[in-house]
Amino acid sequence: MQIASVSIEQSFLMNEVIDLYSSVVIQIATPYSTGTGFLLKDYNLIVTNEHVVRDNSEVIIKSTHLERQLAKVLFIDESYDLAFIEIASTKTQDFPLIKLAVDKEINQGDRILAVGHPFGLKYSATQGIISNVLHERGDINYIQHDAALNPGNSGGPLVNLSGEIVGVNTFIIEDGDNIGFSLPVNYLYEVLEEYKKVKPLISIRCHSCSNLVSEQTLDAGYCPFCGTKLLLPSQVEQYEPIGVNQTIEQLLQEVGHQVQLSRIGPNNWEIEEGSAKISISYYEKTGLITGDAYLCLLPRDKEKIKPLYEYLLKQNYEIEGLNFSIKGKDIILSLLIYDRYLNVDTGIQLFKHLFERADYFDNILVEQYGARWKNDEEGNISNS
């Protein structure tokens, strides 16, 4: 695909928008999925897709202004694929006020940015153009555009060059060439205004008659308007791990980590130990469990890279059960174990060893070998 040219003025505007949204965009994770949301300060709500929070009464949220924490799901709308997440008003003070482009007309050919921040990945923004403003699916007209939407970007904002939200990124065509679809902001505004009347009651929009039903008006599990069976977010069964996942979570708890805050999608957990971030994954087909501690970044000074490599290779001979590797610029300390050898007692010792060594080596590599601390980087513009 030919990359459309971008003027200096447009590029400047895009960078301003990216800076504006870097704090507003929220990472969301559950035991089943990861996704993106965005905070609307004037509504005191985080907006995302319903399919991101589905089957959860609480989700994990995190951003540059928010420490990782559990947050309650307040509202779901299966028809529009929208969900609202609770956030305390005291925690929104440092967030900028974002406007909804409710009264702004959007046209084919308009430039937009799709912003996302899925768990485990850096904040990113991809640019594109609107190719269709009336893509009908069911009874809803979606915005079709060619800004790349990556896995985990669901629920993020679609933004114009004025920094206003024009849509909510909702779905893509599988194997399509950057064909993404976003729910127009007018639908979002309609639901926000309706929910504002019952906030903070936990509520659902009936997928049959479209009426809003709260925990006060739900009639013995049925919609009081049409009789459809409904399940509020607060009524879903809590996630309970089984098998190997249960063992992994038990050993994480034994070594002092809050399990609920570590879940980031199916068979994946993320732990922060000092300055190191440890990603734990279980691959059911092979039975392999991996613990990858993402430490620091390679030095910018090329003269320091060789001594650092030599140190890592030497450590691979000396550290028992662990292994250093390089992926891009990341220095990774890894643990590998097969599920048939895993029990709580052995797991505690193995993962405690990984966590302790990760924080230890992080400091040595930076202080003695010129490696760089792994800080979140600024989002970059990607052309579609």
Image (spheres, rainbow, N blue to C red):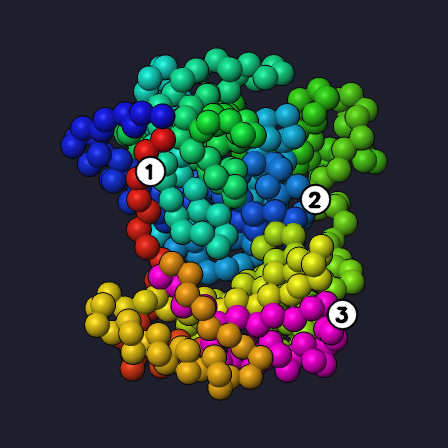
* Residue lying farthest to the left in this orientation: 8
Task: Find out whether the residues at labels 2 and 3 contact each other: C-beta distance under 8 Å.
Answer: no
Q: Is residue 188 something one can see in this rendering?
A: no
On-image quarter of the N terminus: top left
Is 349 covered by the magenta stretch?
yes
* Element under disc 1: strand
Residue 188 point in image, percent of width and height: 50, 27
- Counting residues from the N terminus, which is met first, the one under dot 2 or under dot 3? 2
Residue 34 point in image, percent of width and height: 56, 47
Task: Find out whether the residues at labels 1 and 3 contact each other: C-beta distance under 8 Å.
Answer: no
**Residue type, numbered disc 3:** Arg
Distance from the alpha carbon under mark 2 to that under mark 1: 33 Å
Residue drawn where x is 66% and y is 63% of the image: 288
- Counting residues from the N terminus, which is met first, the one under dot 2 or under dot 1? 2
Q: In this view, does 82 lie to the left or right of 147?
A: right
Distance from the alpha carbon under mark 2 to that under mark 3: 30 Å
Highlighted magenta segment, given as a residue range: 329-358
Question: For the stretch drawn in magenta, what is the main secondary structure?
Answer: helix
Residue 214 point in image, percent of width and height: 68, 35
Judging by the rendered image, the residue that carries numbered circle 1 is: 382
* Element under disc 2: loop
Q: Is residue 127 left or right of residue 205?
A: left
Classed neighbour count for the residue bearing mark 1: other residues with Cα under 10 Å, few (<14), some (14–19), many (≥20): some
**Residue type, numbered disc 2:** Asp
Is residue 86 positioned above or below 68 on the image? above
Numbered mark located on residue 55 in the image: 2
On-image quarter of the C terminus: top left
